[in-house]
Structures are given as C-alpha cells and as structure tokens.
Image: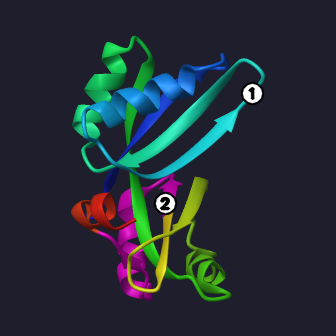
Amino acid sequence: MKLVKQISIFIENKSGRMAQVLEAIAERGININALSIADTSDFGILRLIVNDPESAYIIIKELGMAVKLTEVVAAAISSDVGGLADVMSKLKDTGIDIEYMYAFNGRFHNGAVVILRVNDNDRLIEIAEKRGIELLDAEDAYAAI
C-alpha cells in the first residue's frame, strides 16, 4: 500500500510534555523515523512517522493526549540539489493541493524522503505513478526513513 500512517499529537506547550511523549514511545520500543512539529503559543502539533503507528497511537491515548492517525504519502527523492524541486515540478498543474510536507535525509536510495499531506491521496498516487515519482510502501517508509 502506498499510504503511510502518521501520528499527529496535540501537545500543550508546557515544559516536559514532548519528553513525556517521546519517553513513552521509546519505553515500548517504538522507533521514530521522522518528525515535524508546528507550534503556537498555547499548543503544538507533533507529527511522527514510526515503525508501529497503531501501538504508538494507543500509547499516546493512554497518556490522555489528543492523537490522530492520518494517511500521508512518502516519496523517495534525490538528496542532490534540485531533488525536491523535481518532484514539486512534476506535481504542479495537477490540482493536488499540498496541506503540508516535511522532508528528511534518510537511508533510502539517494537518501531523502518527503512526507506529503495532500487533498487527494489517491490522485497523488495515480499522478506519481504516471510521472515517475517513486512512492514508498508503508513498510518501507516505517523502516527506511
């Protein structure tokens, strides 16, 4: 499957809250492969790609935090200059709206992966296949970022 499950956690901006989440996940042996955080003065949204998203979801729920599983797409890109620009060029004029994205150098092919949250995952997958954008299967994304 070309969709990856991302954990989104709403964290109150208080000292130690992120550490609480990360420690709980680590204690259960779950590896965080990629993350992004966006914050305001009162709260943050921590987005994670982990090797066991269902278990991470349960752990965060047990902490009493608001958490959501979201389907995103992971694309392997070149970490060379212009790698991300190439992918974005292939997506322009397609009607795909990117809500957010984050990229990481990793252990996959040329070393980079971009996580995309878009308005239409199925259309993105269809376009990617036609335009030569390499998408990761969920298992690869959980292990290779």
Name the residue at 46% across, 35% down: 8
Which residue is the site of mark 1?
40
- Front residue of 28/113: it is 28
Position of residue 69 relative to residue 119, above or below, is above
Q: Residue 13: x, y in percent? A: 67, 20
48 left or right, relative to 135: right
Name the residue at 45% across, 27% down: 21
User: As shown in the figure, which amino acid type bears the numbered disc 2?
Assistant: Ile
User: What's drawn in magenta, residue-wise?
Assistant: 115-136
User: As shown in the figure, which amino acid type bears the numbered disc 1?
Assistant: Thr
- Front residue of 110/15: it is 15
Label 2: which secondary element: strand
Q: Residue 57: x, y in percent? A: 31, 30
Which residue is the site of mark 2?
115
Please give the count of numbered marks on the rendered protein.
Answer: 2
Q: Residue 88: x, y in percent? A: 61, 76
Residue 55 occupies quadrant: top left
Position of residue 20 relative to residue 78, above or below, is above
Q: What kind of colouring is applied to the model shown?
A: rainbow
Question: Does residue 49 show up?
Answer: yes
Answer whether residue 42 is magenta in the image. Answer: no
Instruction: Estimate the spatial distance between the alpha carbons at disc 2 and disc 1, rounded to whole Å.
Output: 22 Å
First-in-chain label (2 vs 1): 1
Mark 2 closeness class: few <14, some 14–19, many ≥20 residues within 10 Å: many
Name the residue at 45% across, 44% down: 48
Q: Quadrant of the N terminus?
A: bottom left
Question: Does residue 124 show up?
Answer: no
- Front residue of 92/29: it is 29
Answer whether residue 133 is magenta in the image. Answer: yes
Name the residue at 28% across, 50% down: 51
Q: Residue 54: x, y in percent? A: 23, 36
Q: Quadrant of the C terminus?
A: bottom left
